């Protein structure tokens, strides 16, 4: 590779050209499910790092195998404009999905989102169930 668009530098020794990678099957500590883990190794100093320590995983979703509820949940995007309760106000999703109350840890019956809209002197934030959101149509 002459000029790759992504450059890797070892944080321990500063090497920028001696790397290898390995893919391993492991058991996820949180879910007890088998997952594939990619490890990048600096062949100069031996530092080993898994890719999930460096970047967020993009999950590709096969919509044909999703339930209607799952399709609904994955059909939202942060910063898309939405309306609630058929009102003309434009809301944007700031964060989603939310599955539990952040204060007491109680699980919600359905996924929620933190939505926002500008108001005079600030921003109105609300946490609401995803089912109340509809993509804004002009």
Image (cartoon, rainbow, N blue to C red):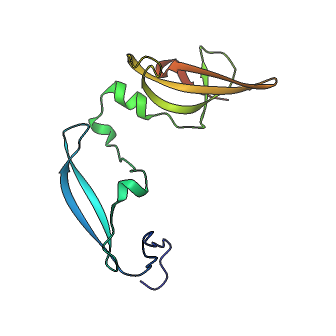
Horizontal side of residue 98 vs 120, given as left or right: left
Residue 88 occupies quadrant: top right
Place of residue 53 in the rendered image (x, y in percent of width and height, measured from the top left): 39, 54
In which image quadrant can residue 31 be found? top left
The residue that appears at 41% across and 81% down in the rendered structure is 17
Above or below 132: residue 68: below
Which of the 4 quarters of the picture holds residue 107?
top left
Residue located at (29% from left, 38% from top) = 64
126 left or right of 49 in image: right
**Residue at the bottom extreme of this rendering:** 2
Q: Nearer the viewer, residue 112 or 73?
A: 112
Residue at x 35% of width, y 47% of height = 60
Position of residue 54 relative to residue 126, above or below, is below
The C terminus sits in image quarter: top right
Label total for image: 0
Q: Nearer the viewer, residue 43 or 78?
A: 43
Q: Is residue 25 left or right of residue 69?
A: left
């Amino acid at each position: 590779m002459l000029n790759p668009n992504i450059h890797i530098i070892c944080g321990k020794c500063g090497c920028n050209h001696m790397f290898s990678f390995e893919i391993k099957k492991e058991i996820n500590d949180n879910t007890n499910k088998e997952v594939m883990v990619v490890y990048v190794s600096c062949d100069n100093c031996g530092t080993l790092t898994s890719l999930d320590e460096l970047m967020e995983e993009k999950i590709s979703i096969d919509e044909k195998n999703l339930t209607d509820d799952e399709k609904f949940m994955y059909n939202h995007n942060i910063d898309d404009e939405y309306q609630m309760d058929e009102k003309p106000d434009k809301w944007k999703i700031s964060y989603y999905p939310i599955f539990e109350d952040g204060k007491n840890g109680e699980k919600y019956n359905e996924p929620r989102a933190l939505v926002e809209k500008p108001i005079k002197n600030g921003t109105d934030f609300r946490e609401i169930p995803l089912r109340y959101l509809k993509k804004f149509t002009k």
